[in-house]
Image: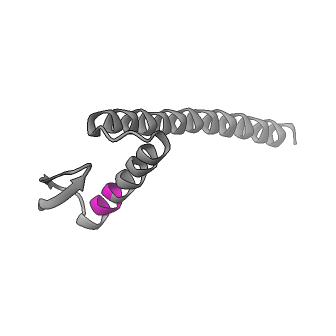
Amino acid sequence: MSSHLIDIKLLGTSFKIEVDENPSYMQDIIDYLKTITSKVENSTGMHDPLKISILTSVYLADEIYKGKKSEKEISELTERIISCIEKVIEDK
């Protein structure tokens, strides 16, 4: 897979990173990050880029953690449903 340079402009700074991902996908990720960063900045009234970055990281880590927890709950529920279906099939 070929690498691409992606330009990031956020919180008053800009830089380029080299990525192996699809540029369109990476732009979607960066746009999402900008959206969350903007929400954090607007809701807290903070203007310190470091503090905004830390709070944004906490927000995103919370999303990831809840997503993983939901995946586990869905997996457990799916296993219970499969078990019930198998029991009904065996009883016939």
Q: Is residue 49 above or below residue 24?
A: above
In the picture as drawn, the residue positioned furthest to the right comes out as 92
Residue 55: quadrant of the picture: top left
Q: Nearer the viewer, residue 47 or 35?
A: 47
Residue plotted at (40% across, 51% down):
38
- In magenta segment, residue 57: no
Residue 77 falls left or right of residue 84? left
Q: Quadrant of the C terminus?
A: top right
Q: Position of residue 81 (x, y in %)?
A: 74, 39
- In magenta segment, residue 29: yes
Q: Nearer the viewer, residue 10 or 68?
A: 10
Residue 72: quadrant of the picture: top right
In the picture as drawn, the residue positioned furthest to the bottom comes out as 24
Q: How are the colours assigned in the image? A: one colour
Residue plotted at (69% across, 36% down):
77
Q: Position of residue 16 (x, y in %)?
A: 12, 55
Residue 40 falls left or right of residue 13? right
Residue 45 falls left or right of residue 52? right
Q: Position of residue 60 (x, y in %)?
A: 42, 39
Using the rendered image of the protein, determine whether residue 24 is visible from the camera's viewpoint: yes
- The number of callouts visible is 0
Q: Quadrant of the N terminus?
A: bottom left
Q: Is residue 8 above or below residue 91?
A: below
Q: Position of residue 41 (x, y in %)?
A: 41, 45
What segment carries the magenta color?
25-30
Q: Is residue 91 above or below residue 1?
A: above
User: What kind of secondary structure does the magenta stretch mostly adopt?
Assistant: helix
Residue plotted at (26% across, 49% down):
11
Residue 27: quadrant of the picture: bottom left
Using the rendered image of the protein, determine whether residue 1 is visible from the camera's viewpoint: no
